[in-house]
């Protein structure tokens, strides 16, 4: 009796194989969508299957995807940050301001990333220390951060960035592969591992599914959420570095409306807006889907604003169709 | 008075995955009479309330209104048949006014179909006056206390011409003066010919106001009749029923050294002056009525809430616990009562639930090692004899008993020194109950100290070496050996004077 | 009655608003002249109308990010109708865009009610779709002042009993909302659904249908605002009122409407919108660059949400009844 390991049965790890799980996943559906869009594009436009054109097309999504990775974790944990585009504006303004005083590229990058971290920490502190709803807090800081850019810049702009700074947004690593692609790929791996292979990632899922049970299980919920806000701020700072470098100038309206595209990318990637589920590979594929749609329609001379119809319809469609299917089948 | 019940349940069966909550129960409510529904926690009282109010649809049996079978598809159906419930957390709207709460859904209309607010206020005042409630009809509900909210709920019941009023633990959060006023109201409702179902743990109030009783045990009907024909001992006997020793594991306990010592724990609103020692290998029971402050105290022990004063010693070291993470490190773990909200993460697989607080053990430098994770989960689910298809199954798909095993496995995997089990067998079937009980005995035998919060008398009697009884946030008795009887437990918990 | 009001969020906000106006008056006394206050109100009228619609949506635990896109689409349709049929009476145009606006709102509502998609996702999607449709129907071209008929442009400016029609529209909407919320079952059910959806079901209220109604009404108001916007500024293009949905939500938050649902009032919504309107109008007269406006409203949102969360915090329940020693 002293050893309590009598009767019980030993349970198998899993009943499904890896292939089965992949096959049935949201990501598989997204890949099919992506391939279909790719083929449709290739048929519709002769300019599509051109390495340089495709390379240019990646700028449509690489910067947004950097933020989307962090935003994915934040949304899985049941929070949201709508101030990311405003953080870009503020970080870009801070870099532009510093560049006036001859700060060199490494210094500028540090300032951009640092501004992002500070903004993220401000959001995180308001949400976790004061227990405020993140959607309202970040609507507020969205105005606040971009508002500061407007105060500093008015209707002016910063140019005068050092030549070496252009490397981030305009540089190529090899052949058609851009620096931003490299950053995107590295971050995809880093965030994929962070979410799917670390204790931290497991805590993120637990918090999103059931914050109370997560707290009772000894997870430091406020700390994890705070880190996620800081991480989102950091990625916004990084996106600010890339975007500023690519544009070569800073206006206070830089990246307006980008937060909604980031959230769209995350949700399209299969991350539950109510928290608790979703994967980084899903976000990666969603980034490609959005990039392909934008690029393909662009080649057909469809204006950007009309493309947004497709993105919006895609967003509602991919979420509504499975639900409608279940409803119809349930009858 | 009439002999035909207004509402009757006949042979009602309600099952949930793995549990039969109601097994062919019957219950009759008569006009102008108060029927007390008596039973321990888990006897099926709240399931009956939810069946009567149309929240649950029974799997078998009939609901009869005026002797005719009816079918409640929604909560609104039940309310159309004149059945209304007054819950502990009264189901009303904080941001609306008293009058609007009384009349929502059937407000008096004036010109153009607009709500006639003047008449509504007037009618509300008349109703409130008729029950002697000195409330302003224009006050917002959020500004009222619980007692006043009850009054609003009762006024609402009168306004919809309810024929059946269900009162579920209505006095749980009321002061003595407020309780007296509530009794007067119940008399008033009786005089209007309403049938009242009164659910309470407190025997003094049952004898004070009920005309009839119905007793449930483990989801089954035990007996009913007129209050005039029974005394307290009869009812306790019916509630507790079976002989206690049979189904519980026999244990021999020799007290070891003190593992946990709590001195002077207090909280501004929930509990006060808690002192006890817990020994190695001991099972210490905490008995009390719902709302006695037991769970709140336990949660302060593991850092969910902070006590305003008091000292906690683990071994011989004073330990300050500010968060559950601190508690896990100190070796105190808590299996909460509310499994769905606080215990299991239902949309995550079994193995991830089990390893959640022990991820430090199954990882290297923060990186998860899946194989080790599965090994740990397999070891502890095996010890608890978990029934599931695989470790990858979502916890939400398991029965209540198996979910509870997952939660216990999760905590055992941290290798604690003290495990607190809050209502460990609430809402789980008899078979799983026995498994949990025998497992608790084994744990204690291996030297783990167990605190068991329970409102089930047989469980408290059968499992505990010692029992602390709490009432209204304070320790009122510590019972062991000869003194540990069902009668003593009930009397101390309810604050009834000791019978000779 | 008065004492009860003195303790409310609205009273605090009103006091803050009056204090703000007096503060501005110390720098520029003309600001609080009745004529100027009337101008400020007229300038805030569009925001007030939209804030009312957003209020009931938020009260039912939803959010509508598509209001500004809805407004812009309806505004463009109004302008195009006017260009195509210059003789069409303005009242017909208004009826048409109000109908269109309610349809667009109802589309949001049906996706929330029948398909069960979270409101933030639905309206994020329709926000981009509605904007895209504006481009499709206008070919990206602007409709300029000279293309619009005189009566079309004149209506919001026409003065009636000393106030422009635009102001009267806002006043009528506020009055209508006050009546709906205080005196109709639908108005009360918005609060019931948001405050306690579980209990609302008990009283026979259909939660999804109530949310659908909130979206539809918000859409109708966006349609009306679409006409007013385009006629007042005498121009229509794809990006009008871009990002205005955030100003609307900001006005709601400042007005004490809880994003968690169930809490809010017409008076609060109006005050929230006026607060933003006063700031916008005051900055130039007190010699602060208008570029400060955005940061100030952001700070105001954060302060407001902190204050709201303090006042809405639930009180602890009391188990301990007597403070005496234990027996």
Image (cartoon, coloured by chain):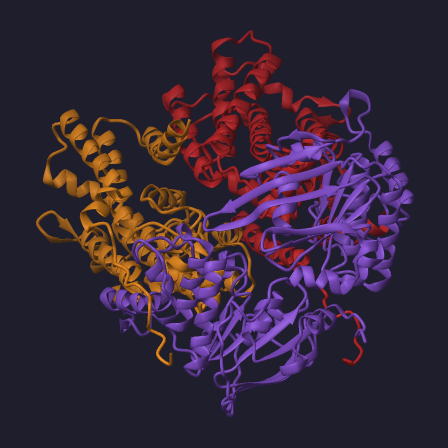
Q: Nearer the viewer, residue A159 or B40?
A: B40
Q: Is residue A117 above or below residue B36?
A: below
Q: Is residue C251 above or below residue B106?
A: below
Which of the 4 image quadrants contains residue A96?
A: bottom left
Chain (red): C
Is residue A89 visible in the rendered structure shown here?
Answer: no
Q: Single out the residue that lies furthest toward the left.
A: A175
Q: Position of residue C290 (x, y in %)?
A: 54, 47
Q: Nearer the viewer, residue C272 or B128?
A: B128
Q: Which quadrant: the N terminus of chain B?
A: top right
Q: Is residue A59 above or below residue B432?
A: above
Q: Position of residue B478 (x, y in %)?
A: 67, 81
Q: Is residue B168 above or below residue B368?
A: above
Q: Single out the residue that lies furthest toward the top.
A: C87
Q: Nearer the viewer, residue A61 or B371?
A: B371
Q: Is residue C129 left or right of residue A12?
A: right
Q: Nearer the viewer, residue C142 or C327?
A: C327
Q: Position of residue C6 (x, y in %)?
A: 80, 52
Specify the colour of chain B. Answer: purple
Q: Residue at x 88, y 48 (%)?
A: B187
Which of the 4 image quadrants contains residue C211?
A: top right
Is residue C271 visible in the rendered structure shown here?
Answer: yes
Chain (orange): A
């Amino acid at each position: 009796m002293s050893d309590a390991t009598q009767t019980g049965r030993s349970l198998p790890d899993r009943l499904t194989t890896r292939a089965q799980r992949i096959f049935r996943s949201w990501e598989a559906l997204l890949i099919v969508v992506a391939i279909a869009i790719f083929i449709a594009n290739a048929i519709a436009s002769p300019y599509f299957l051109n390495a340089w054109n495709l390379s240019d097309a990646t700028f449509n999504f690489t910067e947004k995807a950097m933020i989307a990775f962090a935003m994915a974790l934040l949304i899985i944990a049941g929070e949201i940050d709508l101030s990311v585009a405003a953080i870009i504006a503020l970080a870009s303004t801070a870099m532009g301001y510093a560049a006036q005083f001859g700060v060199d590229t490494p210094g500028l990058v540090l300032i951009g990333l640092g501004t992002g971290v500070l903004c993220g920490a401000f959001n995180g502190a308001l949400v976790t220390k004061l227990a405020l709803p993140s959607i309202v807090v970040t609507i507020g800081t969205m105005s606040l951060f971009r508002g500061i850019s407007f105060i500093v810049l008015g209707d002016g702009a910063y140019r005068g960035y050092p030549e070496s700074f252009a490397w981030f947004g305009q540089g190529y690593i090899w052949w058609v592969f851009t620096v931003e692609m490299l950053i995107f790929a590295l971050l995809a791996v880093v965030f994929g591992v962070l979410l799917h292979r670390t204790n931290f990632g497991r805590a993120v899922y637990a918090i999103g599914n059931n914050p109370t049970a997560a707290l009772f299980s000894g997870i430091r919920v406020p700390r994890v959420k705070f880190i996620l806000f800081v991480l989102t701020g950091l990625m916004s700072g990084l996106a600010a570095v890339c975007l500023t470098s690519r544009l070569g100038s800073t206006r206070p309206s830089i990246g307006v409306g980008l937060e909604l595209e980031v959230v769209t990318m995350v949700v399209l990637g299969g991350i539950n807006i109510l928290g608790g589920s979703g994967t980084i590979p899903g976000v990666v594929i969603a980034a490609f889907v959005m990039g392909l749609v934008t690029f393909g329609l662009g080649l057909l001379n469809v204006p950007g604003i009309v493309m947004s119809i497709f993105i919006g319809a895609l967003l509602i469609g991919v979420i509504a169709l499975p639900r409608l299917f279940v409803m119809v089948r349930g009858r | 008075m009439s002999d035909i019940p207004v509402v009757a349940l006949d042979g009602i069966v309600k099952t949930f995955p793995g549990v039969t909550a109601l097994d062919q129960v019957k219950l009759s409510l008569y006009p102008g009479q108060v029927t007390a529904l008596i039973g321990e926690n888990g006897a099926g009282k709240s399931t009956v309330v939810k069946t009567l109010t149309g929240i649950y649809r029974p799997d078998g049996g009939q609901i009869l209104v005026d002797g005719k079978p009816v079918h409640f598809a929604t909560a609104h159906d039940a309310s159309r048949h004149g059945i209304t419930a007054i819950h502990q957390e009264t189901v009303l709207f904080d941001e609306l006014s008293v009058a609007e709460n009384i009349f929502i859904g059937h407000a008096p209309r004036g010109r153009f179909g607009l709500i006639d607010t003047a008449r509504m206020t007037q009618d509300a005042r008349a109703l409130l006056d008729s029950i002697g409630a000195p409330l302003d009809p224009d006050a917002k509900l959020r500004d009222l206390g619980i007692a006043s909210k009850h009054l609003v709920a009762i006024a609402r019941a009168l306004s919809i011409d309810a024929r059946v009023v269900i009162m579920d633990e209505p006095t749980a959060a009321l002061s003595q003066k407020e309780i007296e006023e509530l009794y007067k109201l119940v008399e008033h409702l009786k005089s209007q010919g309403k049938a009242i179902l009164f659910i309470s743990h407190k025997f003094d109030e049952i004898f004070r106001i009920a005309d009839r009783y119905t007793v449930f045990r483990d989801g089954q009907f035990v007996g009913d009749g007129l209050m005039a024909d029974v005394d307290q001992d009869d009812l306790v006997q019916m509630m507790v029923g079976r002989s206690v020793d049979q189904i519980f594991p026999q244990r021999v306990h020799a007290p070891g050294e003190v593992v946990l010592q709590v001195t002077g724990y207090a909280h501004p609103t929930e509990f006060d002056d808690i002192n006890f020692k817990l020994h190695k290998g001991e099972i210490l029971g905490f008995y009390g009525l719902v709302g006695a402050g037991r769970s709140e105290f336990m949660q302060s022990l593991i850092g969910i809430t902070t006590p305003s004063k008091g000292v906690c010693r683990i071994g011989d070291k004073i330990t300050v616990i500010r968060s559950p993470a601190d508690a896990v490190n100190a070796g105190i773990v808590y299996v909460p009562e509310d499994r769905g909200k606080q215990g299991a993460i239902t949309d995550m697989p079994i193995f991830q639930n089990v390893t959640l607080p022990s991820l430090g053990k199954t990882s290297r430098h923060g990186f998860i090692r899946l194989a080790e994770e599965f090994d740990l989960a397999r070891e502890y689910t095996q010890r608890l004899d978990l029934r599931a298809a695989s470790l990858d199954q979502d916890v939400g798909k398991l029965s209540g008993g198996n979910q509870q095993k997952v939660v216990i496995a999760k905590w055992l995997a941290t290798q604690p020194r003290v495990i607190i089990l809050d209502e460990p067998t609430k809402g789980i079937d008899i078979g799983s109950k026995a498994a949990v009980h025998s497992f608790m005995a084994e744990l204690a035998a291996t030297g783990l100290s167990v605190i068991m919060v329970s409102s089930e008398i047989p469980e408290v009697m059968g499992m505990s070496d010692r029992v602390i009884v709490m009432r209204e946030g304070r320790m009122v008795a510590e019972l062991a050996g000869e003194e540990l009887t069902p009668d003593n437990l009930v009397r101390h918990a309810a604050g009834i004077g000791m019978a000779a | 009655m008065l004492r009860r009001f003195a303790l409310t969020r609205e009273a605090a906000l009103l006091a803050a608003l009056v204090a703000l106006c007096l503060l501005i008056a110390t720098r520029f006394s003309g600001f609080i002249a009745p004529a100027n206050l009337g101008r400020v109100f007229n300038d805030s009228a569009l925001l007030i109308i939209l804030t009312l619609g957003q209020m009931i949506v938020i009260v039912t635990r939803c959010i509508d990010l598509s209001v500004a896109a809805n407004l812009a689409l309806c505004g463009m349709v109004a302008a195009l109708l006017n260009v195509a049929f210059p003789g069409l009476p303005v009242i017909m145009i208004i009826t048409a865009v109000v109908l269109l606006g309610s349809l667009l709102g109802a589309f949001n509502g049906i996706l929330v009610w029948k398909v069960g998609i979270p409101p933030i996702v639905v309206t994020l999607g329709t926000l981009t779709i509605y904007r895209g449709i504006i481009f499709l129907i206008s070919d990206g071209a602007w409709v300029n002042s000279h293309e619009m008929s005189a009566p079309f442009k004149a209506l919001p400016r026409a003065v009636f009993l000393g106030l422009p029609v635009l102001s009267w529209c806002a006043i009528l909407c506020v009055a209508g909302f006050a009546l709906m919320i205080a005196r109709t079952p639908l108005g009360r059910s918005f609060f019931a659904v948001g405050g306690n959806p579980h209990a609302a079901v008990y009283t026979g209220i259909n939660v999804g249908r109530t949310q659908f109604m909130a979206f539809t009404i918000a859409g109708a108001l966006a349609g009306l605002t679409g006409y007013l916007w385009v006629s007042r500024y005498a121009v229509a293009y794809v990006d009008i009122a871009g990002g205005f949905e955030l100003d609307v939500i900001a006005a709601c938050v400042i007005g004490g409407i809880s994003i968690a649902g169930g809490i809010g009032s017409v008076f609060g919504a109006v005050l929230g919108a006026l607060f933003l309107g006063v700031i916008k109008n005051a900055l130039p007269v007190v010699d602060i660059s208008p570029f400060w406006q955005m940061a100030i409203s952001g700070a105001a949102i954060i302060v407001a949400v902190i204050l709201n969360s303090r006042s809405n915090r639930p009180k602890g329940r009391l188990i301990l009844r007597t403070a005496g020693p234990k027996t």
